[in-house]
């Protein structure tokens, strides 16, 4: 098996590029068991063992090179005093290598400027048990005697599921808080204790700073204490710093992955090179469920440079000397597909099916408080609205691709993936081999947004490579990437509010198709005493998958649009209406007030311009956005977005702001243009000409203000997306008087502003 290692000679400028992406683990990985030690050559690695005893022999072979020794899970200290942070998450532009390594360095007192970074390998022993623990236990304090047992059980569960995910805005709030801070603090304690022994001085007289241990004027590098530190048992719950004592965290640090991306040395999945490699591309059945009925590939096979044309059942593959040759040959293949029961499915039939499910289908209650039925009967009035949102593609800038080499009962796979260990498992199952014979080499991802959590593209690569008998770099065309996505679900949602004599809601009922992911996406944080949220299942043949902010994106739009409608019905300002419903939620209220103040809510605007406001909570982060829209040309142009966000604490403020801005642009694309439509069972859109994106010339100015609170650290990558759609449509209503209950806005004809 190929060992994942960092070259010690790689210095700061190259450290991000040399990350061998692999994985994802969560919160206090140190939590289980003892940090046992192995010492050799003066090198020390600090991480965590899951059960009492020593697991480092098992782990070291995957992450060490030469004299490096693994003592625990997330930290290596080499003889030259290089400290390497082993990061259990993939880098897809969200800056996670920077944030997590800074968290570890902060508690360890490592020299940030001299640190190296590598990604943890796709091996079962690096499975991410923190996700299950966090979601099952919600950050609950685990009693000391049970700590080892709980973590051991969670590790076994994660290993059984091959769980190793980057997504859900979990990297900082779970892995960072639980694993990186803890591992760093534990490593520092080990080194200080080792120094106290070697120098025969009181532990209280020592301090750590920038990868050195100090006793008065005397100092020595961390590496000098590696052998001794490796023999010591760590504190499973080391004391962590107060936020007020942070030196790195809370400061805007330059992202470590940027230099390599600027100078072109960064390695994405599409950059993989293997000796003897050919290029492949594919054409899948246009309707999911179809397969090849008849294929004429004679002309394609005769083309220069073509290695082979293959009928793969539900897709056709061409392998050639170059990608363009493969693509040209694929265009020459004549394929007749089998018919499917879904050939006549359209967007209209899908939403009709949804309506039938809501009208007559069995519903499951997700959230319930009070007595909604009674409150509705007693209400002074009842207000209802129906909303619908379309399927959405991920539109990653780097098309789906993977390189595979299948030979001698083994497989090497090079890809950008959000779930390396899960991809390894699927690959092994596909090839009928043990997972130990599959090596996944992960790389930077040119966009993920949930799409690269699904291993269909990697699975095709290994299938085609096996068929071709040579290493194959499989690249999907932009058309294939658009039409064979795993889409954000389209949703039909119906909302009903029982109102008192002042138009304030005393009851809230929402019904929608599809169970929410996560379930709290449909929860209501406003002060409404009687609430019920329920769903009806209504599956279609369209392939679904996680999309940035998952179902918070649909329900952010539904909830904040409906709240705005209730405000208008009550003849109240939308901002003041929300304030009244949030009077007992000081954290939410501060975020809302901050965004309104940033935007100058209520100020006079030029003719045709208006502002809309919304507030959403997702992934433990509260975000409010105020949009200024210009409708003077008959179509919406977003001029400015004021964004206020409370994630408890921003580890890297500049990175946090960048994620808010990114989420806003991503969500704005969906609000203005985004839609995947179905006709005759197939996706109609194919490329950026008909799946339009927000571009530089129509992107708004964005201001972000970070609010620090005492709350637990929340996510950053996704919470900026849900509020933007309703903020835009609420602004459009104020400018035109037209209420938008169906996205995208490009479907609507506004004419001139009213």
Image (tube, rainbow, N blue to C red):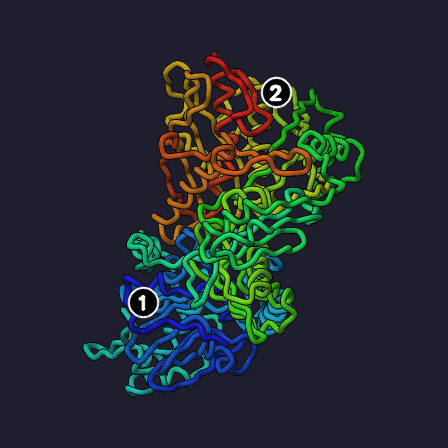
Identified at 63% across, 27% down, the residue is 505
Identified at 33% across, 67% down, the residue is 116
Chain-order first, disc 1 or disc 2: 1
Q: Is residue 519 visible?
A: no
* Residue hosting label 1: 115
- Locate residue 353 relative to residue 395 in the image: left or right: right
Residue situated in front as seen by the camera: 590 or 314:
314
Identified at 29% across, 84% down, the residue is 201
Residue 610 vertical position relative to residue 176 in the rendered view, above or below: above
Q: Is residue 233 visible?
A: yes
* Residue hosting label 2: 502
Mark 1: give few (<14), some (14-19) or many (20+) Cα within 10 Å: many
C-beta proximity under 8 Å, tags 1 and 2: no
| SS under mark 2 | loop
Disc 1 vs disc 2: which is toward the camera? 1
In the picture as drawn, the residue positioned furthest to the left comes out as 217
Residue 533 in percent (x, y) is at 69, 38
| SS under mark 1 | loop
Q: CA distance from mark 1 to mark 2?
A: 60 Å
Residue situated in front as seen by the camera: 400 or 616:
400
Residue 650 in percent (x, y) is at 39, 50
Residue 210 in percent (x, y) is at 27, 69
Identified at 48% across, 69% down, the residue is 121
Task: Tell me, for residue 620, which label it has, or none.
Answer: none
- Locate residue 180 relative to residue 375 in the image: left or right: left
Residue situated in front as seen by the camera: 599 or 689:
689
Question: Which image quadrant for residue 70?
Answer: bottom left
């Amino acid at each position: 098996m190929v060992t994942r290692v960092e070259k010690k000679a790689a210095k700061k400028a190259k450290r991000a590029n040399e990350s061998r992406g692999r994985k994802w683990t969560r919160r206090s990985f140190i939590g289980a068991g003892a940090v046992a030690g192995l010492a050799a050559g003066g090198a020390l690695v600090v991480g965590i063992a899951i059960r009492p005893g020593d697991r480092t022999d098992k782990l070291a072979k995957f992450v060490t090179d030469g004299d490096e020794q693994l003592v625990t899970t997330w930290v290596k200290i080499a003889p030259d005093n290089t400290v390497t942070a082993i990061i259990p998450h993939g880098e897809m532009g969200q800056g996670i290598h920077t944030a997590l390594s800074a968290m570890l360095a902060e508690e360890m007192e490592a020299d940030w400027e001299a640190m190296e970074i590598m990604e943890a390998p796709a091996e079962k022993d690096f499975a991410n048990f923190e996700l299950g623990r966090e979601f099952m236990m919600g950050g609950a304090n685990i009693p000391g005697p049970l700590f080892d047992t709980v973590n051991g059980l969670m590790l076994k569960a994660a290993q059984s599921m091959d769980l190793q995910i980057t997504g859900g805005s979990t990297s900082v709030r779970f892995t960072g808080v639980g694993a990186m801070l803890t591992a760093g603090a534990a490593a520092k304690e080990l080194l200080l204790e080792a120094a106290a022994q070697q120098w025969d001085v009181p532990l209280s007289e020592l301090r750590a700073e920038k990868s050195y241990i100090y006793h008065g004027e005397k100092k020595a590098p961390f590496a000098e204490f590696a052998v001794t530190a490796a023999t010591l048992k760590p504190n499973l719950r080391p004391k962590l710093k107060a936020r007020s004592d942070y030196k790195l965290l809370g400061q805007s640090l330059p992202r470590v992955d940027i230099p390599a991306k600027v100078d072109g040395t960064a390695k994405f999945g599409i950059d993989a090179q293997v000796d003897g490699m050919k290029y492949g591309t594919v054409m899948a059945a246009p309707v999911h469920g179809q397969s090849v009925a008849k294929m004429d590939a004679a002309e394609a096979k005769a083309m220069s440079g073509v290695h082979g044309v293959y009928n793969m059942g539900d897709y056709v593959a061409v392998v050639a000397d170059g990608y363009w040759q493969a693509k040209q040959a694929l265009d020459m293949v004549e394929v007749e597909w089998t018919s499917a029961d879904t050939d006549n499915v359209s967007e209209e039939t899908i939403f009709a099916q949804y309506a039938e499910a809501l009208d007559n289908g069995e519903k499951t209650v997700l959230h319930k408080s009070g007595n909604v039925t009674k409150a509705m009967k007693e209400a002074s009035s009842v207000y209802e609205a129906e909303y619908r949102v379309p399927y959405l593609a991920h539109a990653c800038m780097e098309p789906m691709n993977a390189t595979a080499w299948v030979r001698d009962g083994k497989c090497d796979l090079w890809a950008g993936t959000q779930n390396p260990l899960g991809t390894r498992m699927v690959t092994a199952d596909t090839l009928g081999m043990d997972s130990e014979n599959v090596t996944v080499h992960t790389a930077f991802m040119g966009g993920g947004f949930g799409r690269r959590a699904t291993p269909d593209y990697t699975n095709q690569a290994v299938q085609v490579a096996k068929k071709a008998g040579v290493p194959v770099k499989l690249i999907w065309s932009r058309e294939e990437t658009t039409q064979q996505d795993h889409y954000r679900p389209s949703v039909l949602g119906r909302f009903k509010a029982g109102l008192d004599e002042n138009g304030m809601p005393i009851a809230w009922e929402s019904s929608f198709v599809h169970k929410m992911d996560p379930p709290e996406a449909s929860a209501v944080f406003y002060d409404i005493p009687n609430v019920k949220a329920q769903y009806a299942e209504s599956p279609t043949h369209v392939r679904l998958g996680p999309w940035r902010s998952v179902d918070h994106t649909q329900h952010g739009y539904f909830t904040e649009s409906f709240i705005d409608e209730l405000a208008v019905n009550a003849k109240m300002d939308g901002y003041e209406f929300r304030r009244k419903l949030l009077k007992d939620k000081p954290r939410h209220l501060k975020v809302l007030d901050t965004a309104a103040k940033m935007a100058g809510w209520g100020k006079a605007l030029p003719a045709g311009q208006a502002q809309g406001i919304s507030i959403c909570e997702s992934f433990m982060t509260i975000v409010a956005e105020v949009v200024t829209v210009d409708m003077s040309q008959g179509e919406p142009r977003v001029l400015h977005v004021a964004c206020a966000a409370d994630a408890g604490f921003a580890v890297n403020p500049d990175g946090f702001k960048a994620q808010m801005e990114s989420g806003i642009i991503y969500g704005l694309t969906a609000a203005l243009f985004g839609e995947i439509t179905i006709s005759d069972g197939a996706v109609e859109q194919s490329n950026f000409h008909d799946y339009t994106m927000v571009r530089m010339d129509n992107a708004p100015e964005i201001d972000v203000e970070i609010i620090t609170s005492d709350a637990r650290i929340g996510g950053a990558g996704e919470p900026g997306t849900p509020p933007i759609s309703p903020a835009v449509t609420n602004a459009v209503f104020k400018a035109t008087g037209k209420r938008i209950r169906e996205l995208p806005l490009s479907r609507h004809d506004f004419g001139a502003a009213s």
